[in-house]
Image (cartoon, rainbow, N blue to C red):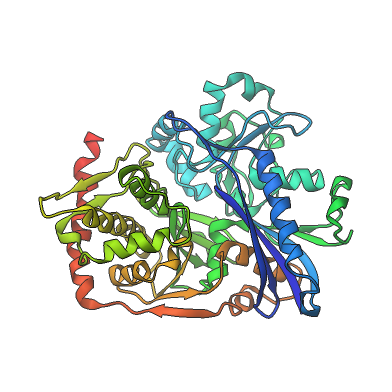
Amino acid sequence: MYILIGIDIGTTNTKAVGFTSTGEVLGSAGASYPVYTDAAGRHELDPDQLLEAVISALKEVLGKMPGAGGGKLAGISFSCAMHSLIAVDRDGRPLTKAMTWADLRSEAYAGVLKASDAGRRIYAVTGTPVHAMSPLCKLLWMREKQPDIFRRAARFIGIKEYIWWRLFGRYQVDHSVVSATGLFDIRRRNWNPESLELAGIRADQLSEPVPCTYWAAGLLPEWDVLGLPKDLAFVIGASDGCLANLGTGAVRRGDTALTIGTSGAIRMTTSAPETDPKERIFSYILTDEYYVCGGATNNGGNVLQWYAEQVLGRKTGDAGGLERLVAEADAIPPGAEGLVFLPYLLGERAPIWDANAKGVFFGVRSIHDQRHFLRAVLEGVSFSLRQIGASLEETIGPIQQIYASGGFTHSKSWLQMMADIFQQKVSVTGWADASAIGAAQMGLYALGILPGLDAAASLVKVESTYEPDADRGKVYEKNYHIFTELYSRLKDLM
């Protein structure tokens, strides 16, 4: 039996999972860090705090696997959030914090580019919708708003690249993370000249793109304190979204991964890149044989947290916070008695790609109390994901089954709501973090322990399934229709 440790570097925390070649989770660990924000749309992380979190989670999970049941530790593999940008100097020292996917400061530049012929060409080549999340748009903003930093920067890298640089002294980036930058040709597997020219940078200011199965050994001497074997393999891995598909077993056509954590996403795995004529969905690389197509929403569990803390004045940090909120909403029938919510508190990515979009409660009446508003919040987030799913179906084909992951899977009621809204069966594994598990699975494949991603996906064990209810589905359908019309009618006022 072999063991891989999967490490997922996220927007609010890093998670590490010990996973065996027989599909068993041996232990998990995590470490969190602060997010630096302001009213201008800034959303950043400290690169060195991220590194500390990776090392802390790794040490903790190693400590939870003494003996590991006789298994052999074969390697460590990485998952990471997409769309980050860090400017570094010639010695690799950060000149900026890491701008995350949620940083909106480049929205004006994204808007101009999106409306241009160049923007349409770049989407077709890179598979990344033009939006403030994109490192390409972040570079446009940095060049104009932080010109001194832009000139001093020797390189422009992302979060995983910084971690990899600190571990091995090499600037390398996997095809999955780089395919989400707006700078990379996803078919030719090289930097896109038009994107580079537009951003005003050279290819030698970026990292070396490598396959997601690429691995290295021989950490820099400062990491001898970890006590790891000198020849232990570190697999570069892929992005968190792509690996969530693998970690939930959604690798066959029609199988769809749905994630709600801080944000949310819905994705299908395909054998070729798919681009949408309406430019609503992304197409990212998983391996040479697999792509992951889908869309992400800025507004997931963070919206429920906002309503609880800012409107109701409650703290949601304890383990039962989500369940209590959903239980209150459950006292109200599906459809929230006509109350509909657009959840665009942080602007929106798919399918509308509008950083200026705003949240709206519609249909408020005197019969509505806070439970109705809670219910409408949950339904609004769910409708947003269904709308992305509709874009996927138009572009790729029908959803056959949904595999759920993320923090919302702790709520049976929310999972049932998703089954009813999509009118699809929703399956859930008992694993803590699909992206970390997916990283471990990718590591097993990269090191030749598993013959392919199909074999890796076969390790996924479904623990529970939620069947759709047709009657509830009809109620949701009425509000969903209102939901999809609202934004198109209000967008000029936002």
- Residue extending farthest top: 148
The image quarter in which residue 494 lies: top left
Q: Is residue 397 left or right of residue 450?
A: left
- Residue 136: x %, y % from top left: 54, 37
Given residues 89 and 200, the one toward you in this image is 89
- Residue 332: x %, y % from top left: 21, 64
Q: Is residue 271 visible?
A: no
Relative to 457, say whether 342 is above or below: above
Relative to 121, say whether 445 is above or below: below
- Residue 323: x %, y % from top left: 39, 64
Q: For the N terminus, which image quadrant?
A: bottom right
- Residue 401: x %, y % from top left: 41, 75
Q: Is residue 379 left or right of residue 233?
A: left
Q: Is residue 45 visible?
A: yes
Q: Is residue 286 left or right of residue 371?
A: right
The image quarter in which residue 46 lies: top right
Given residues 50 and 309, the one toward you in this image is 309
User: How many numbered marks appear?
Assistant: 0
Given residues 353 and 403, the one toward you in this image is 403
Residue at image point 77% right, 65% down: 75
Residue at image point 21% right, 57% down: 372
The image quarter in which residue 425 lies: bottom left
- Residue extending farthest left: 366
Relative to 318, say whether 424 is above or below: below
